[in-house]
Image (cartoon, helix red, strand yellow):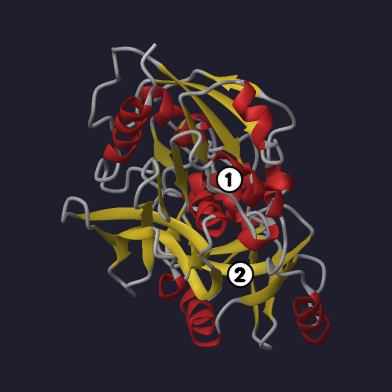
Amino acid sequence: MTGAGKDNRAAAGRAWLALENGLVLEGRSIGADGEASGDLVFNTAMTGYQEILTDPSYAGQGVVMTYPLIGNYGVADEDMESSRCWAEAFVIKELASRHSNHRANESLDDWLRRRGVVAIDGVDTRRVTKAIREHGSLRFVLSTADSNAESLIAKAKAATSTDGRDLASKVTCAEQTTWDAAYDNSFPDEVGAWEGERLKVVAYDFGAKRNILRSLVHFGFDVTVVPATTPAAEVLTLDPDGVFFSNGPGDPSACTYAVEAARELIGKKPIFGICLGHQILSLAMGAKTRKMAFGHHGANHPVRDETTGRVEITSQNHSYVVDHEALPEELVPTHWNLNDMSLAGMRHRELPVFSVQYHPEAAPGPGDSAHLFARFREMVLEQRTPA
């Protein structure tokens, strides 16, 4: 059903959420039956729940939405950031009783069930969020089958966290492919599509969101997407004008193959990185990363761009960060998260390499950070060898 949806919450069963610190909450099952576990993070965005759920960067993590009412505009096929839901589980305060939007294909709860996502509403998400803020990252289990508190807490304590896990190789594409789709008509395009010469870029898929690839196309790139484990030598045989390192899930220090590839490509091709790509590039140039207490997950993070002096409203999704106190001399900080003054971007002093920790393709501003794709294009053109 499109447009206004029916109210089917009354048929929901029960579900139980447990955290490793001993907190157990009961609520309504609004997704698939079953059990899910991993690290639990909270997201402060008011909208964008479908993009969040389908972002591969959430692999290994369950998501708590801090905004209390979720699902009011349903689910639209064109808002998928990948072909499936990657979040391990979904926790909300209240599911909207009806969805209403001319773009909607179905309700959120129908979509969750059809996609096999274990989800819960009717729980105190402020209490859950406070627990994560006070204790740091917490493992969880969400179950529609197990109601025993002791059993649930034991399962939460035994859940696998993202620490030391290479998840990028689990979510990446299976083979090299091309991407030629630009923005959908409904996307808030603040800058017209590039109409001049097109440049070739190879995009490493560590869990790339579709709108990142659309943005590259929009700004004049012909995009070849390669799997996360692709060696640098193979990329160089494609002779791209530039290389892009995408977002993705897991611990960046576990992606040793990607760090090695980055190390071999730096200085040979202009490079732009986002999120996990930013962390991988930083590691390749001698920086260090660390896990944050509860990470940055939301669409309202202020970031100051030291290049322009402007403050941008950004979308962020990361549990690891580059340690600015251990930044090598050749790397220059370019962006700072104004909430906690953590590093949000860097560039190499001499080589054509720059990266950001946030998502310029996500349009929370809506177009505050789209210029970074144009900046990448300008850098590529500056570095091209005359024919």
Are the residues at dot 2 and dot 1 in contact (C-beta closer than 8 Å)? no
Q: Residue at x 17, y 54 (%)?
A: 310
Rendered position, 83 above or below 9: above
Q: Residue at x 31, y 48 (%)?
A: 364
Q: Residue at x 54, y 78 (%)?
A: 128
Query: In the image, residue 176 lies at what x, y percent?
Result: 68, 25
Q: Would you call the spot at circle 1 few (<14 residues within 10 Å), some (14-19), or many (20 or more)? A: many
Q: Would you call the spot at circle 2 few (<14 residues within 10 Å), some (14-19), or many (20 or more)? A: many
Give the left or right position of residue 117, taking residue 191 as reference: right
Query: In the image, residue 215 lies at what x, y percent?
Result: 40, 30
Q: Is residue 93 visible?
A: no
Residue 171 found in image quarter = top right
Query: In the image, residue 345 lies at what x, y percent?
Result: 37, 56
Rendered position, 195 above or below 255: above
Q: Is residue 205 visible?
A: yes
Residue 60 found in image quarter = bottom right
Q: Kindly identify which numbered label has been placed on residue 302.
A: none
Give the left or right position of residue 321, taking residue 374 as reference: right
Task: Look at label 2 and name its amino acid.
Answer: Leu
Q: Secondary structure at mark 1?
A: helix
Task: Look at label 1 and name its amino acid.
Answer: Ala
Residue in the foreground of this view, choosing between 225 and 135: 225
Residue, disc 1: 262
Q: Kindly identify which numbered label has been placed on residue 40.
A: 2
Query: In the image, residue 147 lies at what x, y percent?
Result: 79, 77
Mark before the other along the chain sequence, 2 or 1: 2
Give the left or right position of residue 370, taking residue 198 as reference: left
Residue in the foreground of this view, choosing between 159 and 48: 159
